[in-house]
Image (cartoon, rainbow, N blue to C red):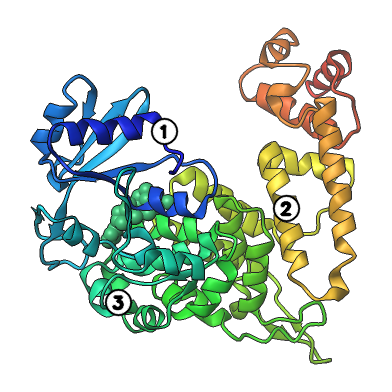
Amino acid sequence: MYDLPPQVLRAMEMLNAAGHRAYLVGGAVRELLRGRGALTDFDLTTSARPEETERVFSGFRLVETGLKHGTVTVLMDGLPLEITTFRVDGTYSDGRHPDGVAFTPSLERDLERRDFTINAMAYHPGEGLIDLHGGREDLAAGLVRCVGDPARRFQEDGLRMLRCMRFAAVLDFRVEEDTGAALLGSRALLDGIARERVREELTRLLCGPAAGRVLEAYAPVAAQVLPELVPAFGFDQRNPWHDKDVWHHTLAAVDAAPATPVLRWAALLHDLGKPACFTLDEKGVGHFYGHGEESARLAGEILSRLRFDTDTRQKITALVALHDRPIVPERRPIRRLLARLGPEGTAQLIALHRADNAAQSPLAAGRQEELDRARAVLDQLLAEGACFQKKDLAVNGRDMLELGLRGPEIGRALDRCLEAVLAEQLPNERGVLMKLAGESMG
Ligand code: ATP
Ligand code: MG
């Protein structure tokens, strides 16, 4: 009845033929019922023990990485299928990992251990949908609801709190009332969760279409992992360009930013330095001099704490640091941005300015057009193949040697050439740049 890849159907048939039960479970069933997008992840649950599963699929490539949890990954015609034995989780003494997993012959028990009703359905082409927790109904109503008692389920595994917010943000769902109350009440449990897992869930949450709404509704939960958000909550900007407090401005900027991890994180962090930089002038207007740098400092701390890789951290902090410097929509300033951030970074900075501006008061609306022009100048420079870094110069180190320059003189001469090209004082042509470099020998 559902359109499943032949590999998935074949794997279920093979398990059934060997006398085992087998069902599609988890996210794949949820997405099938929603009828959205292309499915990529296929999880099967089966009564077969891992060694039995391995026997059934002995002719295929197997990956054993999840064996401890009863998972065998079978690579079928290029499609990885995660096949996990029906299991119940043992007790959770560390609030994250079950102390042991026990296999069970019962599909019901396996579905019971799953986090949310929308993730706790199973499907078999012959048996149809097995929905013991009202998952289909919650899916139709757009609700994320824990299976069983929410406080207990969060106590077992605190990461489920962020998963809950992530699913709400990504699916644009509400959190069911009791689950939401437990989310707020259990948030201290997040202190014990591995930072990498927090990072992954927050990133997915931020990239969801309802990120702003979910972060607003569960701000105290977000603040449990990002305490740097707290000063922004309710912070009145006292400035005509702003009709929202720092937190609500931030949320609007997140929603307005393109849904990529770098830009959504940059939007979330871009104004966190504002409260610390606040001053009031004699007219009673609020200012935030230097807040870009302060926000970038906070962003660096947060991203390091969450174990972001260095490259991503630097990209995000550079955008945050530059978010409050005007972008002049002219060739020279855009070339300088290219020199500093590269093509992708420059496009991202323009996109961040756009999102930031869209989240300001209607008074600031005129800046969108200026940002359109900045984007057009960027596209023009890139289409021309304009030079913005030393390696694109029409002269190189060998040319400098030829001119008789040596050692550090070479780098300095090339710097001068790049500077002249960025400033559009000279074209990027070998003859003129050789002349300039030759003069610098004087
Ligand atoms: P996506 O792949 O989009 O993240 P998913 O629902 O497939 O969504 P996974 O993390 O791949 O999520 O997990 C697969 C299934 O395993 C879930 O649907 C859920 O049934 C179960 N599950 C995953 N993590 C947990 C958890 N922390 N607690 C309980 N059940 C979980
Ligand atoms: Mg999945």
Q: Quadrant of the C terminus?
A: top right
Query: How far from the left and from the top, in percent, is residue 405?
Result: 70, 16
Q: Is residue 69 left or right of residue 167?
A: left
Amino acid on which disc 2 is placed: Ala
Query: How far from the left and from the top, in percent, is residue 267?
Result: 62, 62
How crowded pointer 2 is (Cα within 10 Å; few <14, some 14-19, many 20+) is rated as: many
In the image, residue 128 above or below residue 297: above
> Residue at 87% of width from left, 41% of height from top?
377
Q: Residue 351 got which mark?
A: 2
- Is residue 442 in view? no
How crowded pointer 1 is (Cα within 10 Å; few <14, some 14-19, many 20+) is rated as: few
In the image, residue 113 above or below residue 415: below
Precedes in sequence: disc 2 or disc 1: 1
Q: How far apart are the alpha carbons under marks 2 and 1?
A: 38 Å
> Residue at 22% of width from left, 27% of height from top?
62
Q: How far apart are the alpha carbons under marks 1 and 3?
A: 34 Å
> Residue at 51% of width from left, 41% of height from top?
38
Q: Quadrant of the N terminus?
A: top left
Q: Residue 150 got which mark?
A: 3
Question: Of 236 and 105, which appears nearest the observer?
Answer: 105
Label 1's element?
A: loop
In the picture of the structure, the residue carrying the numbered disc 1 is 5
- Is residue 211 in view? yes
Amino acid on which disc 1 is placed: Pro
Q: Is residue 58 left or right of residue 151?
A: left
Nearer to us: label 2 or label 1:
1
Q: Is residue 99 left or right of residue 404?
A: left
Amino acid on which disc 3 is placed: Pro
